[in-house]
Image (spheres, grey):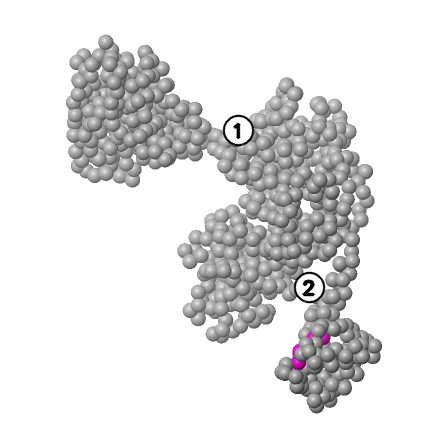
Amino acid sequence: MRSTEPRPPADRPARGAAATRDEVLAAGLRRAVQHAAAYGGVVYLRSPDRASLVLSAVAGVPLSLLSGFRRVPVAGQLPAPVAYRTGRTVALSGAEETMRRFPRLAVGLPYAFASASVPVSAPAALGGERYGALAVLWPSSGAAIPAAVRRQLRTAASRLGAALAELAVAGHPVEAGGPPVEVELPGPAGPAVRVGLFDWDLATGLLTADEGLYDLLGRSPESLDGRIGSIAALVHPEDLPSLRAAVLAAVRTGVLPSRTVRIADGHGRHHTVRIWGRCPGGPARTHLIGAVLDTGQGAAAVAAVERLRDGVFALDPDGRVDYANRSLELLLDTPRERLLGHHPWSVLPWLADPEYEDRYRAAMLSQRPTAFLARRPPDQWLSFSLYPDAHGLTGRVAPTGPPRSRHQPAETAPPDDGEPSVPRTAPGAMYHLLQLASALGEAVSVREVCDAVAEQIMPGFGGQELAIYLSRAGRMFLVAQRGYPDGFLDGFEGTSLRARLPGTEVLNTGAPIFFETEHELLAAYPGIPVDDMRAWAFLPLIASGHPVGSCILGFDENHVFSAEERAVLTGLSGLIAQALERARLYDAEFALARGLQQALLPHRLPDVPGLEIAARYLPGTQGMEIGGDWYDAITTPRGLCLVIGDVEGHSVGAAAIMGQLRSAVRAFATTGGPPEEVLARTNQLLVELDPGLLASCCLLRLDPATGQVEAARAGHLPPLVRHPDGRAEALDLPGGPLLGVDHPSHYPASTLHLAPGAVLALYTDGLVEEPGTSIDTGVDRLRTTLAHTTDDGLDPLADHLLGNARHLAHRADDVALLLARLLL
């Protein structure tokens, strides 16, 4: 259920017992928006657990546009949480600064608006407690928000904080709860609809009227004697005869149909009103009860709009049509009854491109006129112009010709006629940008980031070439490219940052460079090598003030970069830079972590007469944290110990415990102790270390001369054996608890005999676990694969058992596999 703004809608909340949190929020937010001359604003309150800020009041902004920001973490990198945490004002002058400092906000609301966020705190005298944050929005001008406006905003926030503190002292809740309050701001000035009611006693001629009728007539009750004759004297003489005839007919029929008459106002001028009524009772009707409606200039305005040949419509703040004129019906070939109460893009399939809905969002959040072209099938082009304010949006639709080419030179563009310019970015470009933002959020490596940029920016802006360079040790190095001729970029590899080239200068200055023609590029950089491209965008990649690299987008024809397109590309470069910086750090840490893990595993397996051994290890591919899988083959006086284990979790801590356990098992097994004793002593060590992690382990000691095997398990999966006749089975060995559960623990031993040619297989759960299937099913599938594999050597057999696991791009867990064959 939508929360409505509480009454009274005054500039300050009601005091005393009647004051509520919602009243306080509504009054405080309205005051802040009005005093800051903003078009809208929001208030966030802390959640009861104080881990989140929850949207609790909104004014001047459609609530539907804020769906992705209804609840934000206190620790998040967004303006409201930062203001709440630091107690400082966070001011953003426009889209570019928002993209640079708060890319998540810019991705969720990729529109041109300025904002300022301030903390909402109680005064020191009331404890100084911080309750949330308040933010207001302005149309983006590119200029810094004046200090005076910031002070006014902090004053409004302080008053709101004081009011909340008073509620808290009175025992009322002040944390977030329930749906947001939607605060109504004062509407635009315009002709109001006025209604007056009357009761005319037909027998006595006395007329009783309410205050509305006297206000409508512009007279006080004292200036009229209460008789119908005084009222009739105000009616235009030409309208009196028809009005008298209608009243007589009403006495007979009981109904006075709606009629238009002219009434004199207090200045001697006449204005049009409508009057209607009824005469209750039977044949002897003695009273006429009715109403007078004065629409001011509204009716004339509607009539004027209906006479226009251009289509005119109005959208409410949520984007639904609440007015459409007759010409719009004709231009859209759709009855207005189908449009009213609906989003236009949901009714008209040819407006269903996300770009068109985005134009409405852009207009509402930037509070600036915008425009676009759309083609109504089969070939009718229409120009849409949108004019927003905080209460909704007015649109104008006019027929037009096909759009000029996006590569057409600027000098052929039509002159500025005061209308909002039609953007040249192709419909759906914003869709590509949002897709890019989503892809960058998932990309973890430099290669994945570059692939995401290439796959979204090139189709989004129509570019044919893309190159991404990263800076390292004062030089530029290519990390990704699309569309360039073979060898063309070789001459730029390792270019010094001091070189006078557009790709290095944008990085040194932090400002992008756009060349709309080849002539512009060659005039600025004589002698620079060029290929078949004719226009370029050189974008600096700078993250948190640190230069990362540069991105070059090339076009095969002259390209006019609109102001909007330049702003979007410039802002987007900050998002790419942050993703690349994060990915570069990831790649370095990933290589370090994998190197550490590989160092903890055996560098080579022992050469044991009578035995063939093979092992495989595959790291997981999801996330950069390393796992705790390990394997080992240890020569002892009583045979060869085959060990496989798995420490729970994926972290450096898990890898460290894995290294300690491998060393412990190796030390205890080398002394010649039986498998059950080795596991018991290892368990004791892990319990004493108390790392908070558990581990599974399977240990088999094999005598190659006799084929005798002693085995013990600590919560690990059963080993597999393939007999010489090709039959394979899972060894149902008794086992003890996981290592690290309790001390002391018992690990029962088992003995079995292997015939020459038999193969033992030890493995970790990463090889047999699959989403949606039980682990027993995975073990049985591995057993079947082992039974039906005819490879003669263990290395081909190991590769075959790994199967699809070695080719998966997204493998959640590590895989370890250890094989041993008793030779004939």
Q: Return the x and y of residue 330 as percentages of the image width and height.
A: 73, 51
Residue at mark 1 = 447
Q: Are marks 2 and 1 in contact (CB under 8 Å)?
A: no
The amino acid pointed to by label 2 is Pro
Q: Residue at x 68, y 82 (%)?
A: 288
Q: Is residue 541 left or right of residue 403?
A: left
Q: Residue at x 70, y 48 (%)?
A: 333
Q: Does 277 lie within the magenta span?
A: yes
Note whether residue 419 is visible. Answer: yes
Question: Which-is-in-front pick, marks 2 and 1?
Answer: 2
For the C terminus, give its image quadrant. top left
From the viewer's side, name the closer residue of 824 and 638: 824
Q: Return the x and y of residue 62 as percentages of the image width and height.
A: 59, 55
From the viewer's side, name the closer residue of 705 and 100: 705
The secondary structure type at the circle numbered 1 is helix
The secondary structure type at the circle numbered 2 is loop
318, above or below 604, in the image:
below
Asked where in the image residue 222 lies, by quadrant, the reply is bottom right
Q: Return the x and y of residue 722 as percentages of the image width and height.
A: 26, 18
Q: Is residue 625 left or right of residue 782?
A: right
Residue at mark 2 = 188
The amino acid pointed to by label 1 is Arg
Please, which residue is most extreme toward the right here?
A: 238
Which of disc 1 and disc 2 is earlier in sequence? 2
Q: Main secondary structure of the magenta part?
A: strand
Kindly report the distance in space between the C-alpha atoms of the residues bearing marks 2 and 1.
53 Å
From the viewer's side, name the closer residue of 221 and 479: 221
488, above or below 93, in the image:
above
352, above or below 91, in the image:
above
How dense is the environment of label 2, judged by Cα within 10 Å: few (below 14), some, or many (20 and up)? few
Q: Does 26 lie within the magenta span?
A: no
Q: Which residues make up the magenta segment? A: 275-279
